[in-house]
Image (cartoon, helix red, strand yellow):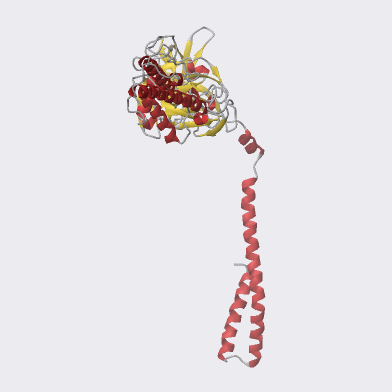
Amino acid sequence: MSADTAAHTAEFENMERGEYLETAGLLPPDSRGKSRESKERAPGRQRALLWVAVAAALLSTGGLVASTLVKSPAQQAAEAAAPPASVLTATVEDRVLANTVITRGTVAAAAQYQVTPAGSTQGSNTLVVTAVRTRVGARVEPGAVLLEVSGRPLIALQGAVPAYRDLKPNDDGNDVAQLQGALRQLGHYHGGDPAGHFGPATKAAVTALYQNLGYDVPTTGGPGDDGDRSALRSAQDAVDNAQRAVDDIKRQIAGGGSGTGSQSSAKQAGPAGSGTPSATSGSGSGSGGSGSEPLQVQLQYLEKALQQAEQAQADLVARTGPMLPAAEAAFLPGFPAQVVAFSAKVGDQVKAPLITLASGQLAVTAQLTTDQGGLLKPGMKVQITAETLGLQASGVIGAVGQVTTGNGGSDPGSSTGSDGSGSGQAQSGAPYIPVTVTPDSPLDSRWEGQDVRLTVTSAATPGPVLVVPLSAVTAGADGKTTVSVLQTDGHSTSRVEVGAGISGDGFVAVTPVAAGSLKAGQRVVVGAQSGAGLS
């Protein structure tokens, strides 16, 4: 303790002692005043002592900080110098080596069908999209309306043969039988017509289909059936006139007519344009000698005319009425189907292809980069993994297409591999190779539309082999293929000549030329890195 500090301490103690004595009344009056003066001077001295202590602490801290920042030139040069170079190494492995391609794919129906309404729709010669009832990726069931063209529906129906003609009453053919099957599937057709014949039962089923969908039934007479109504009325009039003529002759005969009769009734049997023969044709001779046919002969002519009128009416009825326009039917071989492509908007004119649908057994489609597409061949085994479902399936490469340039990235399966191995999936706008994978067994409906991972093993060694990274193998000027083996001291290396075999996934199978010169577990040099330790 310094002398000044000791003096201050003693003075403080005296001041405290005097204050106690003054309080107790033991000091004389003149001493009490001195005690108060000492008490009043005490706070000032205390503050001074506090500032002295703070200053000392700051000086000590500053000295400590300065000692850490100040470096000698030699120390600065040592820290700025590059660290010693070291090598990167990898372990020689003994395992089966496989060359695998991993990419993403989309599960959808295997076959695709482009549908574009052609010709004209009922009541319109201009084909314009007026309503859209679906979207890309949507599931399509039979009987669904995909869209409207000029106010008329495009209906998805079960069938292997595309619509190539309007199906009308009295038509015959396999396409009519296909329509009957589609209507039966929807519960509208219950038989009644010969297979493949568009008869009354088929007309009734077509009527039920459109009524169930909420659209006017298309007919051979056009909107409102105006074109057929006049012809049907004329045919009915012809039958009525022929029937009246027959009835009139019969009344004459029943009334005891003389064997010849008036020609008025006979003339009624052949209305203009009916094409029916008149009972007055031919000269014939009767008992009256007037040249008129006997009533019985006239009756025969009139009855024949009636039959012809009735047959003409029946033929007209059979070939008119409800029909299925080709522009309103999209036949697909299997359901559920899926919309693969559709870009038209309401108001757009119809251009081919208007809509593309996938139908049939579920398969997987993928788009590979051009460098990986060459590794795949039809028949190669594929592992199909749906991560979101937790399901796996097996399959084979069904088809490998040609290099295609297009919007490959728009495919739902254009994402990269989730396992971090890198995907062969083509990027948007880049050339790609389309690949189709056929499952070994049918996939159930849960797989439909799933983005799946595809793992294809294009080649594999028959058993375990020595494997090193591709970067570990070098070809020298002498034509020898070697690897550099790190010695046990951790610094020196030795070259070992090897023969390279199959490669895959960044590795290559090697066989040492000298037996035993390379073993599993040894470290081979794969590169050099400044400042890095051994890998």
Residue 485 or 255: which is nearer the viewer? 255
Residue 253 or 45: which is nearer the viewer? 253
Report the number of discs: 0
Residue at 44 percent across and 32 percent down: it is 210
Is residue 368 among what the camera can see? Answer: yes
Provide residue 411's location: percent of width, then percent of height.
50, 27
Is residue 465 among what the camera can see? Answer: no
Quarter of the image with the N terminus in it: bottom right
Residue 535 or 98: which is nearer the viewer? 98
The quadrant holding residue 72 is: top right
Residue positioned most to the top: 478
Horizontal side of 33 relative to 275 (left or right) equals: right
Provide residue 385's location: percent of width, then percent of height.
39, 28
Residue positioned most to the front: 288
Provide residue 480's location: percent of width, then percent of height.
49, 8
Residue at 42 percent across and 23 percent down: it is 239
Residue 515 or 444: which is nearer the viewer? 444
The quadrant holding residue 198 is: top left
Horizontal side of 274 relative to 21 (left or right) equals: left
Provide residue 93's location: percent of width, then percent of height.
39, 21
Horizontal side of 165 relative to 34 (left or right) equals: left
